Image: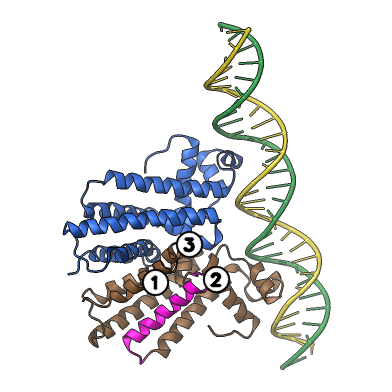
Chain colours: A brown, B blue, C yellow, D green
Amino acid sequence: MNTAQNTKDRIVELGRDYMQRIGYHSFNYKQIALELNIKNASIHHYFPSKEDLGLAVIEKDRQDFIQLTQKYRKAKAMDKLEALIANYEYFFSEGRKLCVLSTFSSSYNEITERMQLAASQYGELVTSWLTATLKEGLEAREFSFKEPAEDLANVWMALMPGSLLVGRMGGKPTFDRVIGSLRQTLKSS
Amino acid sequence: MNTAQNTKDRIVELGRDYMQRIGYHSFNYKQIALELNIKNASIHHYFPSKEDLGLAVIEKDRQDFIQLTQKYRKAKAMDKLEALIANYEYFFSEGRKLCVLSTFSSSYNEITERMQLAASQYGELVTSWLTATLKEGLEAREFSFKEPAEDLANVWMALMPGSLLVGRMGGKPTFDRVIGSLRQTLKSS
DNA sequence: TAACACCTACCTGTATGTAGGTAGTTGTAA
DNA sequence: TTACAACTACCTACATACAGGTAGGTGTTA
């Protein structure tokens, strides 16, 4: 999103990018080192272990999410959701990336407990924001869905990563179709 | 599912199981070798490269899917879909596995072209079966959804893997909620 | 002069994969 | 029925590569 200045931030940015593209385990320090023109060992200077970098990536993504919710604090519910969807459109078009949450969820059984916890807590944060936003839009009669907002929030939590997964195999038309259906869940025509 | 007899089949079964749990790349020959009480090199006897085993796993899963569709050929549409859902319930309860398709989709940018193709084709097969089944159930008035069956099939293709992903982080209640909503997509209240 | 940002050089573990061998089984043909 | 060839299902031992990580150094800047 925003261009990072110092090396540490750039390592996190690049790390996140790679992890979203190829996953936490396939990602390695060499790729970042090459791109930043520094040596492998220098990354250990900032992040002693790979877990540290993983945690930093999750935290960075969480902060970016919080920043987005702040920015759209006073916007319409629909605009909030569209801002979130825009991220996913970006992920898909920019190298068929997964979102950070689904990246770590894909590797969930092979990451440390601390990373599992960080990912889960981040997930809860997004879910509760989604729930609140859905309720908000319902009360303002922007939306007209019938099921409990909590349920729909969970559907979104599953459908957004899911759209990226099937989009990887089925291509843009498939991705677009799922995102289109996602928007439809707000209306009970 | 069914107990495999010979070593080759058992390698595929175990390989699939591990891949669903920890992903294609984290999985390694040693784990299987230990469990089957054979040596690492013996696996190469059956599957010269890891790609060969990956392809065999995809093919095995595809065959199992075809077998399921055959078995339920004359069943009600709802029973067909419930049979599919049962698989996902099983995946989740049995070690929070992903389905084979989402496993390879998670690693999509890091697997060979042949594996990408095999996974994509398998995905198309499932999608078209889902589409046909949804149409079938609609005509029989088992379902009452409003959107095109193609769209809903894609939603299922995204929502089923998605339920496993969020279930890993949010636990059984989250998983159940998404599966519950999945069933609801068939009715337009 | 102390902290910082980076370096060279190296250790260790582990993964896929290969070369070549052996014990037992099966097919074939005198 | 015996005899030999070929195959199957493994094995030991090793090659190769590359990952994460460490120890200890250098040059620059506050």
Q: Is residue A75 magenta?
A: yes
Mark 3: amino acid: Ser
Chain of the residue displaying label 1: A
Q: Disc 3 vs disc 1: Cβ atoms closer than 8 Å?
A: no
For residue B85, above or below residue A17: above
Q: Which residue occupies 31% across, 74% down?
A: A153
- Disc nearer the start of the sequence (2/1): 2
Quarter residue C20 falls in: top right
Residue A176: mark in rendering: 1
Corner quadrant of residue B33: top right
Mark closer to the observer (2, 3): 3
The quadrant in which the C terminus of chain B is found is bottom left
Measure how far apart labels 2 and 1 are at the Cα level: 30 Å
Q: Say which chain tag 3 marks.
A: B
Residue B183, horizontal then vertical, whole percent: 25, 62
- Please determine if labels 2 and 1 lie on a single subunit: yes
Dot 1 falls on a residue whose secondary structure is: helix
Q: Is residue C19 left or right of residue B76?
A: right
The vertical placement of B128 against A58, above or below, is: above
- Circle 2 crowding by C-alpha within 10 Å: few under 14, some 14–19, many from 20: many
Q: What segment carries the magenta color?
A: A74-97
For the residue labelled by badge 2, is the local secondary structure a helix, a strand or a loop?
helix
- Look at mark 3 in the image and give the residue it sits on: B106
Asked if residue A162 is positioned above or below residue A129 in the image, the reply reads above
Q: Main secondary structure of the magenta part?
A: helix
